[in-house]
Each structure stands twice: as structure tokens, then as C-alpha cells.
Image (cartoon, rainbow, N blue to C red):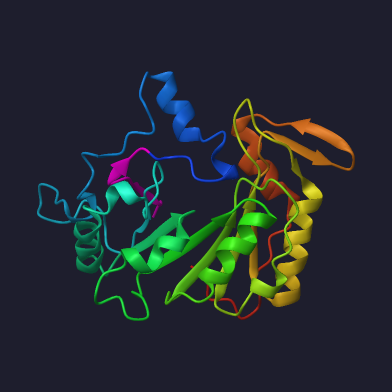
Amino acid sequence: MSDIIWNPWHGCKKYSEGCKNCYVYRRDESVGRDASVIGKTQMFDLPVKRNRSGGYKVPSGSVVFACMTSDFFIEDADGWRDEIWDIIRTRRDVDFFIISKRILRFMQCIPDDWGNGYDNVSVVCTIENQRQCDIRLPVFNTLPIKNKYIACEPLLSEIDMREYLTPEIRRVVAGGESGNEARVCDYNWILSLRSQCVEKNVAFHFKQTGAKLKKDGRLYRIERRFQHSQARRAGIDFIPDDSTIK
């Protein structure tokens, strides 16, 4: 079963260093749209929509990635988020992934019955450099979330996150930046993150090279269509023997 993208709202406001060359801004600009304007989409209630036979359009057991063209915790969506939590609560048979740079707003944005977290919700804290690592991960580690992930995308510097790699972190994902204006990702930064994950027995996934990858002193320019496959060919993913990651 393939993963499903669910964007209940679209548009975002640039938040930190990683947002400089945001792909949403690039795509919206190409069609004359202002990506900084946040609005509901036609797929707002997608997980609870039904097909002609009466079943859900999103099948049971699906993996749904929420707000890939915005941020789940963005302030502009505060008035809509309760409806989204109702939908997530209704579809406990679906696994939802929430990826956010705004993890510092987490406690302001959860529902009253959140407790220690929903079993069917994974939260991915994104970081792009050491500065954001040291700002976000100390907070992330304290939050009541059952399924925690870290995404280092776009990776813009070497990052030392050893002190934050607790047993509660299910996986670290890393990747370079895409687009014509992409900043360079150094393969040594990727290998460093992998080594830290191996040391702490945390799963690691090299997701994509980005458009500009520096390796062994040489700069490689990689077409978008090859960025994921080239990362897979590196063969550096790490899965602990006792891993139960999704």
C-alpha cells in the first residue's frame, strides 16, 4: 500500500534557515500563487471521505503524511486544527505522520485527550543545522509523543545530536536540498549522523542526496529524478536488530 499525502491546508511562512529555498514557494511561484497565504484545501477532510460503495477513500492501514505543503503547527491554522484532530481520532486504523519545524508550539496545539500521545500519530521534528538542533531537540525530547522521529532535511551543516538520541527516537532521516538554488550537502555530514545513530542504536535512513552533494572533495550535481535512488545506492541505512520502526 502506497503512502498518502494529506494537505488539509496549503501555504506556509518561512521560519528558519532550512526554509530559504522552500519547494512549496518554488512551485507556487511557477503558477503565480503566493505561498505565504495559508488556506484550507479541498482535501481538508480526506481521511473521512467515503467512496461510492460507502467505504473510506483512505483505506484502513494506510500511512498518511499530513501538511506536506504547510506546517501542521503553523499559527494560521489554529482555528482549524481541532477538526483535524477529530478526523485523526476517528481514523485510528490509519497511521498519521506529522512533520514540523514548529515543534516549540506542540503543547499549544494538542487536543485535550492527547495524554501521552495517540498510538496512530508519529511526530517528526525537522532540523537543518546545529543551531536548530540545539533549539528544538531538547524540547522535542520532553514532549508526550509515542512515536518520535527526527528529519535532518535539508541538511545544511554537520550536526552533533548524540545527547538527544534517546531510546524514544525511532529513526533519524537525513537528506540534502533540492532545486536549482540548493545549498551543498556534504556526504561527511551524512556519515557523521549515521555514526551517531549506530553508536546510540537508533535507526538511520539516508533519504536523498539533494541537488548538490560534496563527496571526497568533489561536488556532484544530481538531477532530481536520481536523488532518492543515489541515496539508496549508498547502502548506508542502519536498522537496529531490535527495531520496531514503522
Q: Residue at x 48, y 27 (%)?
A: 26
Tell whether 49 sits left or right of 227: left
Q: Residue at x 52, y 70 (%)?
A: 139
Q: Residue at x 36, y 26 (%)?
A: 34
Q: In the figure, residue 218 lies in which quadrant?
A: top right
Residue 136 placement (x, y as % from top left): 56, 62
- Specify the quadrant that holds the N terminus: bottom left
Using the image, determine if residue 146 lies above or below residue 71. below
Using the image, determine if residue 34 lies above or below residue 246. above
Tell whether 144 sits left or right of 92: right
Using the image, determine if residue 223 lies above or below residue 139. above
Residue 44 placement (x, y as % from top left): 22, 47
Q: In the figure, residue 99 lies in which quadrant?
A: bottom left
Give the magenta-colored segment's residue range.
Answer: 1-11
Q: In the figure, residue 110 lies in which quadrant?
A: bottom left
Using the image, determine if residue 222 lies above or below residue 119. above
Residue 244 placement (x, y as % from top left): 53, 76
Q: Residue at x 27, y 63 (%)?
A: 60
Tell whether 218 sits left or right of 157: right
Q: Residue 18 magenta-drawn?
A: no
Tell whether 38 sits left or right of 204: left
